[in-house]
Every structure is written in C-alpha cells, then in structure tokens.
Image (tube, rainbow, N blue to C red):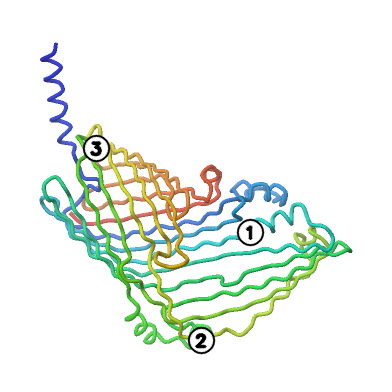
Amino acid sequence: MKKIFTFTAILFCNVAAVFAWPINIPHRIVEFGVSASGGFSNNTLKAEDFLKKEAVIDTAQIAEFVPDNGFQINMNVLASSFFNLNLYDGFHLGFEAGVEASGDFNLSKDIFDFLAKGVNVGQTISVDAKSDSDAFYYMNAAVGWNTGSFHFELVPTLVLPLVHAHAKKAKGYFVNEADGSIVSNVTLEMELNTITSMQPFFDDNFSSKKLTDDMKQGWGFDIGFSIERPIFDMLQGMLYARIPVVPGTLSYSTLMKSTMTYQVEGIKSMFESGTSSPEWKNEDKVYSEEKLKLSRPLRVGGQVAWRPFGRWISFDGMLGFGIKYPYTSEARFYAEYNASAYMSIAHVIGVKASTGYSDEVFKHSVGLILNFRVFELNAGVSVQGGDFANCFKGSGAGAFATICVGW
C-alpha cells in the first residue's frame, strides 16, 4: 500500500508539473490587436431607482443611503492597440499605444440631509463638491525572458498627459427663509490644465498644427516590471510594479468661473416642472501658460494563478495598492484586489468571471472568450460602483472587448 501511495504521489506531481504555466499564457506566436473598456458608476443610486413607470424622488431614502463621504460618481475609459511576439523559452516582445482616462465627482452629504430634513428658519447650510479628471496618452515597449525558473518582464513607457480637470472651488449655500422659501447661491471654479491652449477651441480658431507641436513636448516616463515563478506545482506567483519616474507636463491652464442664484417657494418646488430656472452667470475665461506635473498612478502588488487540472481551468488572485498623484501633496492611497475563475473547452471557448476593487471602484464582471488561433475575441460586461453590495443592484455598469489576429 505504501509503494502504491508513493507511486501515485510521484505520478501526480509529474503530471502536475506539466501544468506549470505562466500567469498570462500566450495564445499566438505573433499577434496584432485592439482593446477597449469603459465604465460609469456611483455609490448611492441603483437601477431600480430609475427603471420605474413613474419615477418618484424620495429624498429621505436617498439621504439615508448616501455614505458619510458623500455622493460619488466615477468613470473610466481605456482604448489601445498592440503587437506581441512570443518565442521559445519565454521570450516576449510587445508594443502598445493607447489612451486612458478616469474621473470622479463628489458631492457632500449635507445637501441630501438638507433636502430630506430641511433646516431651521434662517439657518444656512454649506455644501461642497470635488472633482478630478485625467487623460493620458501612452506608448510602451515590453520585453520578457526566462532565467532559470523565473520569468521577467520589463515595460518602459512614455506617457503624455492630455488634460487634468480640477474643481478648485465648488461650494453652495442654502438658506431656509422665514416664509418657507429657499434661497441658494452656488460658486463653481473649474481649472483645466491641458497639453495645448484651449483658447482656440472656445474661440473656434483651432489649429491642428499647434496641437501637433504641443504634443511633442511634456512627455513623462514610467517603468513597469514583474517577476514570476512557480511557487509549487500548479501554483504560479508574480510580483509586479508600475513606477512613475519622470512626470509629464501640462503647459496651459484655463480657469472658468460661474455663479448661480436660485429661489423657490419650498423643497417640493425644486423638483416640480414650471418653476423658475436657476440664474447662471459665467465670467470670462482666463487663459495662461501654467505648468503642471502629472503622473499616472503608482501600482504595486502580487498575483497568483492556481491551475489544479491544467490550462483549461484557472483560479487567479491579485492583491496590491495604488497611489494616485504620487510625489505630490494631493497623493491618494487606495487598495486593489481581484479574484477570478476561468474555464475553457478545448482552449477554444472560455468563460471568465471576476470580482475586485481597482481604480477606487468595485467591479464584478463576466466575459466570453472565443479563440480560433488566427482570431480571438474576448468581450464581456461588468457591474460597478463605489459600494460592493450596490454593484449588484445596478449602481453602475461597464463593458470591455479585445480583438486579436495572428498565428
């Protein structure tokens, strides 16, 4: 019995060793492809709040579900094209270029408490808002190779920031008057830092040559790398990092200021049609040449892939962290994680489901993979949101697709 057990264990280990595949398994020797993804979400409102025959705005219920950190909206977009060459012994050469953009908007909880409960006569309530959005263009070259049981990847990247939109001042005041009316005053001050001057756009005097010349300057530099090796049979591990080295530069600034005054008879009137419209006053835009240093988020973490039955089924896990606006006073730390399960039939038809938190948003996705060697389609949908549970209730959604051709 002992000999049988020993023989079985040795056989199992030898078979399992065959299944020691890298985390990202190449599907072709040479390939070209395009990829796109995007998503929009919030941390309070759900799909059921809108998908009704007659929409009813329940301010008390909304105020109850708004977190203490306020009402948050997030968006993210990524589009890229790439080329990969995968040769013997783990050698990999790749090139990629694309655009990535993200943004968030936050409105303090005070406004929702005010709409739900009101305030005492003559009492003033102050409401704050925050907003940050960024867009980058990038080009990278990746090279990978095996050394012993390790696989190394090095990804130097040129990064050009395109725009940074920041709410320098966004504040509102609401006063409950003695006659029950509500008087509001809102001040909005938005600054756009851009790669080229925005004045020609607003003045209908756009010059493509000026934009092309401006895009030759302001480039930054990131360095990405990963180290991968088998932890034991069937389990592959990897450490990764993306470190901004030289920040990119935005050389132009546009400052936009607006004020709004609004008076209604009461809270109910704010939601009824036929009431007077808010009176907005827009000041002249202020253009200047003001430099802003901007980097993509710093990312560090680890990833594992467990394949107990070979390539046709895989369970992956990732844990790490990111720092938005690294090396600045606005630096913001956030954690990242992801867990996924993948299953395929004859490596032609595959299904992948995942759940995770990245870019400060919870995401749960499911995708279909069709791989016919010369052509591959990887597409799916996701539910997203600033709250884990509300994601499943439709607080946000996204989609992604990747198309590859090669052999």
Task: Give the CA separation, mark 1 to mark 2.
Answer: 36 Å
Amino acid residing under circle 3: Leu
Secondary structure of the residue carrying tag 1 is: loop
Would residue 192 be found to the left or right of residue 208 on screen? Answer: right
Q: Residues within 10 Å of mark 2 (few under 14, many from 20)?
A: few
For the residues labelled 3 and 2, say whether their Cβ atoms are less than 8 Å apart: no
Mark closer to the chain start, 1 or 2: 1
Q: Nearer the viewer, residue 274 or 60?
A: 60
The residue depicted at 56 percent of the width and 72 percent of the height is: 168
Q: Is residue 46 left or right of residue 388?
A: right
Q: Amino acid at mark 2?
A: Asp
Q: Return the residue found at the far top.
A: 1
Residue placed under numbered mark 2 in the picture: 204
Q: Secondary structure at mark 2?
A: loop
> Where the C terminus falls, by quadrant?
bottom left
Q: Horizontal and vertical percent for residue 391?
A: 52, 46
- Counting from the top left corner in percent of width and height, residue 364 is at 45, 45
The residue depicted at 72 percent of the width and 67 percent of the height is 173
Q: Quadrant of residue 141?
A: bottom left
Do the residues under discs 3 and 1 have CB atoms within 8 angstroms?
Answer: no
| Residue 77: image location, x then y, percent | 43, 61
Q: Name the secondary structure under disc 3.
A: strand
Q: Earlier in the sequence, mark 3 or mark 1?
A: 1
Q: Amino acid at mark 1?
A: Ser
Labels in figure, total: 3
Marks 3 and 2, how far apart at CA: 58 Å
Reply above or below: 382 against 124: above
Determine which residue is flagged by label 1. Answer: 108
Is there a contact, CB below 8 Å, between mark 1 and mark 2?
no
| Residue bearing the label numbered 3 | 235
**149 shown above or below 153:** above
